[in-house]
């Protein structure tokens, strides 16, 4: 079982990439290489068998040469057959010793790759999985997914609380460089989402690059995690209702949003700039969503002191600051407000 979960802080499993060769073929090539090296040593020993002496019967047969070669490669020999000429000794010194080292490295490397490392990786993956809770899943590390991940980190999210899933090794390597936990796999499969404990996640962000794949991922994630908020990027407007039916709480159309910015710029040169500020944590202003506080209950949305209240959500329905419902806040209301961003204000 290949284990691709990793973090760049070296506390977890190192980054893994998909092997170029099947496991059985890689193992076969190593075995053939080991036998080839043994064959070279056997051939030279047989050619120079006159330089060997059998201390048992004095006759060096092919079986004796085969025995001597295998014993010498795998151990230091037993002394029953020994090289007696300078040429035989030099061969053992300068050719057989490197062959012995290479053969041992092949067997040790094979044991590490196919047994020890896989067992170690499996154990470490279990450690990572047990620690995953209240994390954010970013499924798809293309342009949108990468930007979302960087924005989350810029907003103060601990990179170790972000898990990126993508089937491409290049995308996984790019995500790993940000310090997040990564999993190389297909998020449309139940096993992949279960490996990252999707039911324990705080939120799921889906941007697979194709609407059909994104909707299928949303459908799979919603079936495994009924309560986790899911946001998805959809390019075609016709697919937005399908994404909502699949279980997405928020559907974002980047094409439509671009059109909104372009159209808004025709009504004033600074509208698009202000909207971009609201969408990013690096602007002079930013949007914030929070629950109403106990001391704010009964007050108007206009009277909150933490920012400029612009929208109120009550029982899932939105109300503007001009609505009668916004005149008196109630427990459980959600407030969307405009607050000062990270960039210093021009009037300061």
Image (cartoon, rainbow, N blue to C red):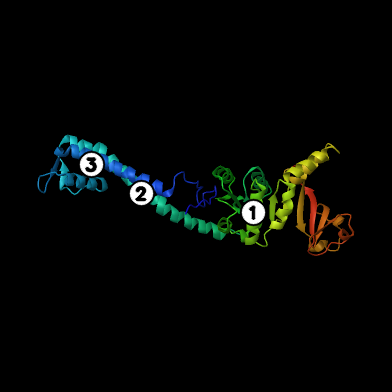
> Label 2 vs label 1: CA separation?
43 Å
Q: Residue furthest top?
A: 87
Q: Which residue is mark 2?
A: 108
Answer yes or no: do the residues labelled 3 and 1 have beta carbons within 8 Å?
no
Measured as percent of width and height from the top left, residue 246 is found at 69, 57
> What whole-number distance in Å separates the C-alpha atoms at marks 3 and 1?
59 Å
Which residue is under mark 3? 42
- First in sequence: mark 2 vs mark 3: 3
Specify whether residue 145 is in view.
Answer: yes
- Residue 129 rendering spot, x and y as whole percentages: 55, 58
On the picture, is 318 further left or further right than 88?
right
* Residue toward you, 114 or 159: 114
Q: Which residue is mark 1?
A: 216
Q: Is there any visible trace of residue 346 in the rendered image?
A: no
How far from the left and from the top, in percent, is residue 214? Answer: 65, 50
How crowded pointer 3 is (Cα within 10 Å; few <14, some 14-19, many 20+) is rated as many
Helix, strand or loop at disc 2? Answer: helix
Q: Secondary structure at mark 3?
A: helix
């Amino acid at each position: 079982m290949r284990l691709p979960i990793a973090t760049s802080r070296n506390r977890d499993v190192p980054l893994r990439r998909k092997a170029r060769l099947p496991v059985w073929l890689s193992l076969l090539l190593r075995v053939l290489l080991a036998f080839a090296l043994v064959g070279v040593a056997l051939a030279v020993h047989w050619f120079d068998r006159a330089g060997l002496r059998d201390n048992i019967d004095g006759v060096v047969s092919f079986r004796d040469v085969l025995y001597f070669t295998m014993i010498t490669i795998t151990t230091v020999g037993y002394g029953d057959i020994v090289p007696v000429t300078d040429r035989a000794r030099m061969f053992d010194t300068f050719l057989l010793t490197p062959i012995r080292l290479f053969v041992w490295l092949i067997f040790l490397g094979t044991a590490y790759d196919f047994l020890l490392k896989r067992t170690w990786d499996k154990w470490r993956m279990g450690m990572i999985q047990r620690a995953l809770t209240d994390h954010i899943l970013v499924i798809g590390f293309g342009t949108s997914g990468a930007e979302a991940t960087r924005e989350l980190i810029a907003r103060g999210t601990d990179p170790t609380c972000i898990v990126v899933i993508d089937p491409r090794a290049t995308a996984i390597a790019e995500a790993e460089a940000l310090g997040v936990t990564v999993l190389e796999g297909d998020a449309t499969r139940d096993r992949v989402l279960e490996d990252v404990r999707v039911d324990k996640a705080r939120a799921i962000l889906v941007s697979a690059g194709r609407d059909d794949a994104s909707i299928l991922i949303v459908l799979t994630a919603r079936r495994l995690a009924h309560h986790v908020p899911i946001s998805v990027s959809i390019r075609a407007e016709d697919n937005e209702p399908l994404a909502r039916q699949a279980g997405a709480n928020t559907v974002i159309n980047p094409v439509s949003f671009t059109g909104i910015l372009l159209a808004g710029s025709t009504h004033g040169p600074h509208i698009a700039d202000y909207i971009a500020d609201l969408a990013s944590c690096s602007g002079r202003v930013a949007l914030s969503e929070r629950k109403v506080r106990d001391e704010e209950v009964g007050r108007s949305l206009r009277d909150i002191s933490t920012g400029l209240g612009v929208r109120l959500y009550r029982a899932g329905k939105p109300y503007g600051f001009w609505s009668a419902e916004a005149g008196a806040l109630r427990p459980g209301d959600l407030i969307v407000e405009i607050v000062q961003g990270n960039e210093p204000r021009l009037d300061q």
